[in-house]
Amino acid sequence: MRTGQPMALFVTRRRCALVAALAWVAMTSVVGAQVAGSHRGLFVGTGTFLSSLNRPVSAVGHLDARNRFSLVATTTGGPWSLWGTIAHATTDIDNTTVLAIASDGYAGTTQRPLRRGLYRIDPTIPGSASTLWSGSASTPFPTGLGALALDGNGDLVGISASLSQALHWERATGAWTGTTLAGVAPNAGVGGLVWDKIDGDFAFTNGALPGSQALYRLSADRTRITTIATTASTLVASGFGGALLEDGTWVSSDATGAFEYHVVATGASTWATGSTTAGLSSISVHAERYSAPGRGYYIARSELRLGRYVSTVAYADATTTPHTITNLIVPAALPNGIDALLATAHPMHDADLVTARTGKATWQLRIAPDPTGPTFANRPFVVLACLAPVSRNAPIVVPGRRELFFNFDALARLTLSGQAAPFLRDTIGLLDASGRANATIDLRLLGTAANGLVVHFAGFVIDAAAPGGIGWVLEPWAFPIDVIP
C-alpha cells in the first residue's frame, strides 16, 4: 500500500496489497502511545483515609501522559464528594470517561456510607462525576460490587465478593441482575475482572486469600465458569487488580507484600510468584494496549513508611524473565496532602473499538482512536471483521512494530469490499471532525440463529504521514453475538 493513496483506490484496487502491507515489519518509527510503556493517561484512585473530621475520604484523579499527578480528595459539597476504596474501574464506551463504584454521604460521624452508586468519572476534569445508578447502602442487592468490566453489549459486569455473583448492569434500562458463581473461591473478583477483547469472555480472580488463589474464565452470558488455575501456596495472594496480557498470560498484583507480581502463564494450570519485591508493594495491575509492540502492564505501588504512604506508578515489561519493572515517577507521598494507599492506575483511552447495544439485534460499533483531541480528524479508517479464531501469539505486525490481532478470512474480505451489508455498515469511511466514527451491526435478518458466534473486529486509521501510511492501530474487540428474541 502506498502512503497517501486515495480512499477509493485503497478499497477497490489494493485489497491484496493490504494483506502484504500488514504483514510487513518496520523496525523503526513510533506512533504516540502505541509504543511499549507509553500511555495517554492513567485513571488513579486511592483507598480511604480519615479526614480531620474523622470521616473517611478518598481521592481520584489522573496521571497524565507526562506522568504528572492531578488528584482531588473528598470534600463535602466539593468537586469530589464521594469516597471509598477506588480500586476497580473500567473505561466507558466513549473511550474518555471511566466507570467506578463509590460511596456517598456518611451515617453521622461513622465510616458507614448512606448510599453507594455507579459513577462515570472524567479524571481530566477535577472532581467530575455523574451518577449512573445509586441505592441505599443497606440494600442487600447489588452489594459488594468490586471488579468491573464492559461486555460485548457495552453493559457493565461486576463481581460481588459478598454475594459470590456476577452482577450485570444493563445500560438501556439501568437494571441490575445477578448470576450465582457456583464453586468459586471466597473473595471472588477482588483480584480483578477483565473482558477478553480477543476471545470474547471474562477472566477473573479472587483475592487477598493466601492458599486459595484461583483464576477463572466466565462465559460472555455469565452462565459457565471454567477454572483455569489454582494453588495451595500461601505465598500467592492477589491484590486489587489483575491483567490479562495479549498472549493469554494472567498477571496479578500481590497482597502478601513479598513479591512484585503473581502470574499464570498461558496454558498453565497453577500460579507462580514473580520476583521478590524491592520496597513498594504492587496494589493493582492493568495491561497496556495490545496493539503496542511487546507485552506489558502498569502497576499502582504503595508502601507505609514512618506512618505515611509512599506511592508510585510503574511499568512492567512482561517479555523479560523476571518482568522488568520501571517506576514512572519517583516514589513519594501523593500530592495535595493525600495520605492513602494508591489503589489503582488504570490506562485510559484504550477502548478505541467497542460495541454497544442499540436494540434487540442492533449494535453501534464505536471508533475513537484519540478522544483526547482531533488528531485523526477526517482521516480514513478501516474496520475489518472475521469469524476465524484469532491467534494471540501471532499478530499481524505493521509499521512501527504495532500489532493487529486478526485473521483474514471470508468475512474480512466482505467487510473490506463493503459487501457485508446489511449486517455490517460503515466499517470503511472517514472519521468526523472530532476524530470519531460509528459503524452499525444489524442482525435482524439473522434472528437468534447466529447467537454464540464471536465476531472479531480489528482496524486502523490511514495517515499518509505515518509509518507505512498507518496512523493508528485500533485495539482488537471480540463481539459475541447475542440477539434478544
Image (tube, rainbow, N blue to C red):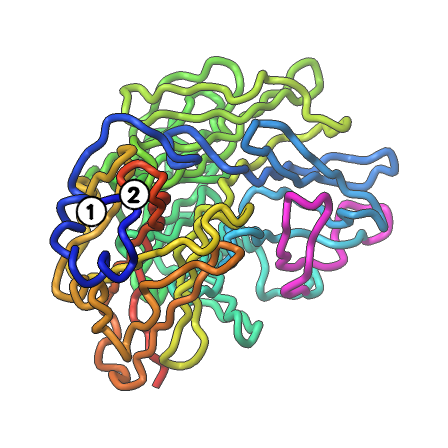
Question: Is residue 28 shown above or below 426?
Answer: above
For the residues labelled 1 and 2, say whether their Cβ atoms are less than 8 Å apart: yes
As measured in the structure, the alpha-carbon distance from the residue carrying label 1 to the one carrying label 2 is: 8 Å
The answer to whether residue 408 is left or right of residue 404 is: left
In the rendering, at what x and y percent does residue 162 appear? Answer: 53, 54
| Disc 1, SS | loop
The label on residue 239 is none
Residue 316 at what x, y percent from top left? 40, 25
Q: Amino acid at mark 2?
A: Gly
Give the labeled residue for mark 1. Answer: 1
Is residue 192 left or right of 134 when viewed as pictured? left
Q: Nearer the viewer, residue 50 or 432?
A: 432
For residue 157, above or below residue 213: below
Q: How many marks?
A: 2
> How busy is the neighbourhood of tag 1: few (under 14 within 10 Å), some, or many (20 plus)?
some
Q: Please provide the residue range marked out in magenta.
A: 107-134
Image vertical order of residue 136 relative to residue 351, above or below? below
Inspect the magenta stretch and tell me whether residue 120 lies in it: yes
Q: Is 20 on the left-hand or right-hand side of 109?
A: left
**SS type, badge 2:** helix
The residue at the point 44 percent across, 26 percent down is 315
Q: Nearer the viewer, residue 360 or 22?
A: 22
Residue 462 point in image, percent of width and height: 33, 49
Expressed as whole percent of the image width and height from the top left, the position of residue 138 reads: 69, 62
Quadrant assignment for the C terminus: bottom left
Res. 469 mark: 2
Going from N to C along the chain, the mark reached first, 1 or 2, is 1
**193 drawn magenta:** no
